[in-house]
């Protein structure tokens, strides 16, 4: 991890650079974000899918842009301003320029009563509407009278943008890594995923890989549906495991969300890596889904995808509000998020099936793998060597074998390499 682009401080700096940009499911905010990610890590191939394009049961909506928005109180004071925080406007709001009394305006105001200092994130992508989001404390302080509401926005034919990087490996079998890019200024929920995904893409280009890696980043839900609709055959034919990245930048916990039956290779890898990273990790059932695992694991798609996280979306109090800011994600949190994801990749890369080559237990001292002096207890290294040989039956892959001997795969693969070099194991 010597490359500075995989250092937590660098990852946090990129998150900070992206944070002020107003993103949505379409538009220049997404394109600008891809440009920055490409400059800082690796350029993605961008795809533009025109407005009106059918994607299964959906279609790409009009592209949305916004120049400014504000709310002026009866005294002429600006009490809500999009320039202060781009969460202040309901995402995809139609243009508005009207004066209306407070009692009518309340129908277009959004706040969270139990989080009085938070601006909520509210959207209206598929039904034309408008509104302002503000802290509940400020909403309570608004006094009766007429308010001037101004939103300078546009809905026009345009395109949805998504980015893709394919890094060839020795095999045509693929590992999918995905994240989403569509939310405005929220650090953990929005930016930790794509930043870690792009860092992983750059890291993968600096390795020799057994598998081919497909890294795809798109607007959540509609972008994933669009991507699957355009790539379904290839994904079903080639993807052996997939990891979606979401909320992977805080310091509070480690968690992952399983596939529907929790039994794919991706589930087994994530479970093993998380268990050996933090024994207090949380595995969430697919019943608690909420992001693009809904699309990847849907019937008739059925891809082996799990979602890798630190604290799960919806499980931290700042979720979908302005409190999900640059203080919630940390350099350490992002780096540990990168490391747990990269360990999942490393586990996949070394996950093979071995069989012992000798009848009975080989004389390990001949190979320098056991002390020639016998003791009451076996040293840890010999115990692991002996256990690996005992369970290398040509049927278990290294994930299963590691689980059986109670050691992380990164310890076990070191031993299998040693035994392979000495002719005591053979890859099946």
Image: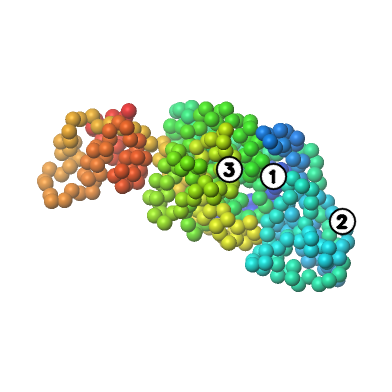
Q: Can you name the residue that lies furthest to the left here? A: 373
What whole-number distance in Å separates the C-alpha atoms at marks 1 and 3?
17 Å
| Nearer to us in this view, 112 or 149 | 112
Q: Position of residue 219 (x, y in %)?
A: 65, 43
Asked which secondary structure carries label 3, the reply is helix
Q: Earlier in the sequence, mark 2 or mark 3?
A: 2
Q: Name the residue tied to disc 3.
A: 294
Asked which secondary structure carries label 1, the reply is loop
| Nearer to us in this view, 90 or 346 | 90
Q: Name the residue tied to disc 2.
A: 97
Q: How is the image coloured?
A: rainbow
Q: Position of residue 313 (x, y in %)?
A: 56, 53
From this viewpoint, is residue 52 visible? yes
In the displayed structure, would residue 139 be above or below residue 296?
below
In the displayed structure, would residue 160 be above or below residue 88?
above
Q: Name the residue tied to disc 1.
A: 25
- Asked if the residue at tag 3 contacts the one at tag 2, i.e. Cβ–Cβ closer than 8 Å, the answer is no
């Amino acid at each position: 991890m010597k490359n500075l682009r995989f250092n937590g401080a660098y990852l946090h700096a990129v998150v900070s650079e992206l944070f002020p940009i107003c993103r949505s499911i379409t538009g220049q905010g997404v394109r600008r974000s891809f440009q920055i990610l490409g400059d800082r890590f690796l350029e993605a191939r961008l795809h533009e899918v025109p407005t009106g394009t059918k994607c299964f049961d959906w279609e790409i909506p009009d592209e949305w842009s916004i120049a400014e928005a504000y709310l002026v109180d009866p005294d002429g004071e600006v009490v809500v301003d999009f320039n202060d925080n781009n969460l202040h406007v309901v995402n995809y709001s139609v243009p508005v320029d009207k004066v209306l009394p407070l009692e009518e305006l309340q129908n277009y105001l959004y706040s969270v009563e139990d989080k009085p200092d938070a601006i909520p994130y509210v959207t209206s992508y598929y039904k034309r509407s408008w509104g302002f989001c503000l802290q509940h404390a400020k909403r309570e302080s608004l006094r009766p009278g007429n308010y001037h509401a101004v939103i300078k926005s546009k809905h026009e034919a345009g395109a949805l943008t998504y980015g893709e990087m394919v890094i060839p490996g020795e095999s045509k079998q693929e590992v999918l890594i995905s994240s989403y890019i569509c939310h405005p200024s929220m650090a953990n929920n929005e930016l930790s995923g794509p930043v870690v995904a792009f860092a992983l893409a750059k890291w993968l280009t600096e390795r020799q890989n057994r598998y081919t890696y497909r890294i795809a980043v798109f607007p959540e839900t509609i972008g994933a549906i669009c991507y699957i609709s355009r790539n379904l055959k290839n994904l079903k034919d080639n993807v052996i495991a997939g990891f979606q990245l979401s909320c992977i930048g805080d310091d509070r916990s480690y968690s992952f969300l399983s596939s529907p039956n929790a039994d794919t290779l991706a589930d087994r890898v994530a479970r093993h890596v998380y268990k050996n990273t933090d024994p207090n990790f949380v595995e969430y059932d697919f019943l608690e889904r909420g992001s693009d695992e809904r699309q990847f694991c849907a019937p008739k798609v059925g891809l082996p995808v799990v979602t890798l996280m630190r604290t799960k979306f919806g499980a931290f109090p700042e979720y979908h509000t302005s409190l999900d800011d640059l203080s919630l994600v940390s350099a350490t949190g992002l780096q540990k998020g990168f490391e747990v994801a990269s360990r999942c990749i490393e586990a996949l890369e070394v996950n093979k099936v071995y069989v012992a080559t000798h009848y009975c237990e080989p004389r390990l001292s001949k190979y320098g793998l056991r002390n020639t002096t016998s003791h009451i207890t076996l040293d840890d290294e010999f115990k692991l060597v002996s256990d690996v040989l005992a369970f290398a039956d040509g049927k278990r892959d290294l994930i299963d074998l590691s689980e059986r001997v109670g050691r992380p795969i990164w310890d076990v693969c070191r031993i299998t390499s040693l035994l392979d070099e000495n002719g005591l194991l053979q890859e099946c």
